[in-house]
Image (tube, rainbow, N blue to C red):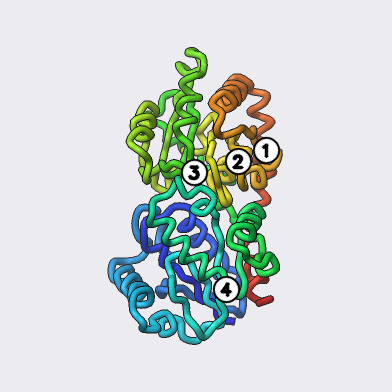
């Protein structure tokens, strides 16, 4: 079987989808056996993962995006030419006109542009509308969580029988963090509460800053609030608010694991997640997690995190206070978190994904 995967998100700035594709393709290739895993554009070897820029060289990046543009904006069957001989084409939100001579599949990552459109710019909503048309035409679909599948069936009226839930994975490095400490490099001299992710409305950082600032003075004096991640489409008010915390900006992949592992608590009060990579990564690294009781987050966190109403400053404040002041609770959450995170390995995801393709 010859499987062609649209890898164009690896050529642009991206967060969760880029993370998914990078590790998913890597592990599919390791386990493919007689099957062939190819990509569009042709990426025989994936470079280092960088969420801010392309993982490929300049020429391959330009040619790949140019071919995608030809496919999306002209009648030329550019993807048919680029994926000649494929039995299956696995599309992403960037591909508007997939090949016509092979089976069509795709991964549904989340439905937030549909369930919370007010939190997204117009460009995101247009892209998701195009992807919805593609999903309706697809032969089979992968959903990264049961929550995502249920939302896709409800909102897009998709046939539940053609959607298979295959949870994403966590990079192996999070299960075995390096011994080195990156705190000095980032000027982190106190224990800290950590958030990692793009700064955008859905991540609910206004509530996190408010909850942290409502903590007793002695707790705030002994623990910093650290916000790491690139600026997205956050409002001016949110940007001003997060500047009151220790904002680190984009963190290179090499520093992400040790920065996570060194945190006292990981706080992630997102309003909606299709899977929630940062939560599972923190649990794998042995960090106690506080996260939301909505969308897929209870599904992936299980009983291994403190779940709160993300719209309640009071609930988040009380959770932060409980975890920061109780070593016993932190140890319990660490043990539970590591056990729960072990359910989300890329090897398992790849094995189930290959079975999905072979059944198709």
SS for tag 4?
loop
Mark drawn on residue 171: none
Taking the spot 43% from the left edge, 70% from the top edge, the residue there is 95
x then y, percent, for residue 312: 56, 28
Q: Quadrant of the N terminus?
A: bottom right
SS for tag 3?
helix
Taking the spot 53% from the left edge, 34% from the top edge, the residue there is 267
Mark found first going from the N terminus, 4 or 3: 4
Residue that label 3 marks: 257
* Mark 3 surroundings within 10 Å by alpha-carbon count, few (fewer than 14), some (14 through 19), many (20 or more): many
Give the camera-side residue of 284 and 68.
Answer: 68
Q: Are marks 4 and 3 in contact (CB under 8 Å)?
A: no
| Disc 3/disc 2 C-alpha distance (Å) | 11 Å
Mark found first going from the N terminus, 3 or 2: 3
Residue that label 4 marks: 138
x then y, percent, for residue 334: 64, 34
Q: Quadrant of the C terminus?
A: bottom right
Mark found first going from the N terminus, 1 or 3: 3
Residue that label 2 marks: 283
Give the camera-side residue of 150 and 222.
Answer: 150
x then y, percent, for residue 326: 63, 21
Q: Are marks 2 and 1 in contact (CB under 8 Å)?
A: yes
Residue that label 1 marks: 304
Taking the spot 54% from the left edge, 41% from the top edge, the residue there is 271
Q: Are marks 1 and 4 in contact (CB under 8 Å)?
A: no
């Amino acid at each position: 079987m010859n499987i062609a995967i649209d890898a164009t998100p690896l050529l642009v700035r991206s967060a969760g989808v880029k993370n998914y594709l990078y590790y998913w393709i890597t592990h599919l290739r390791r386990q493919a056996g007689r099957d062939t895993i190819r990509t569009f554009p042709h990426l025989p070897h994936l470079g280092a993962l960088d969420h801010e820029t392309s993982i490929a060289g300049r020429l391959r990046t330009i040619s790949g995006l140019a071919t995608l543009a030809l496919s999306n904006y002209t009648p030329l069957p550019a993807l048919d030419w680029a994926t000649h001989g494929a039995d299956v084409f696995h599309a992403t939100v960037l591909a508007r006109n997939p090949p016509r001579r092979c089976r069509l599949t795709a991964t549904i990552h989340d439905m937030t542009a549909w369930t919370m459109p007010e939190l997204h710019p117009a460009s995101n909503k247009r892209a998701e509308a195009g992807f919805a048309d593609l999903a309706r035409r697809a032969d089979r679909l992968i959903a990264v969580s049961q929550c995502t599948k249920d939302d896709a069936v409800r909102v897009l009226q998709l046939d539940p029988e053609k959607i298979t839930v295959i949870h994403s994975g966590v990079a192996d490095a999070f299960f075995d963090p390096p011994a080195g400490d990156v705190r000095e490099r980032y000027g982190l001299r106190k224990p800290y509460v950590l958030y990692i992710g793009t700064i955008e409305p859905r991540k609910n950082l206004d509530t996190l800053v408010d909850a942290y600032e409502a903590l007793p003075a002695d707790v705030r004096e002994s623990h910093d609030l650290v916000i790491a991640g690139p600026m997205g489409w956050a409002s001016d008010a949110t940007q001003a608010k997060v500047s009151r915390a220790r904002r680190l900006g984009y963190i290179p992949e090499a520093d992400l694991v040790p920065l996570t592992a060194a945190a006292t608590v990981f706080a992630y009060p997102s309003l909606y997640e299709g899977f929630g990579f940062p939560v599972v990564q923190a649990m794998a690294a042995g960090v106690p997690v506080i996260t939301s009781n909505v969308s897929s987050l209870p599904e992936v966190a299980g009983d291994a995190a403190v779940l709160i109403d993300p719209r309640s400053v009071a609930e988040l404040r009380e959770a932060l206070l409980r975890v920061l002041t109780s070593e016993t609770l932190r140890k319990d959450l660490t043990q539970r978190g590591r056990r729960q995170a072990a359910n989300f390995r890329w090897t398992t995801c790849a094995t189930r994904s290959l079975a999905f393709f072979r059944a198709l």
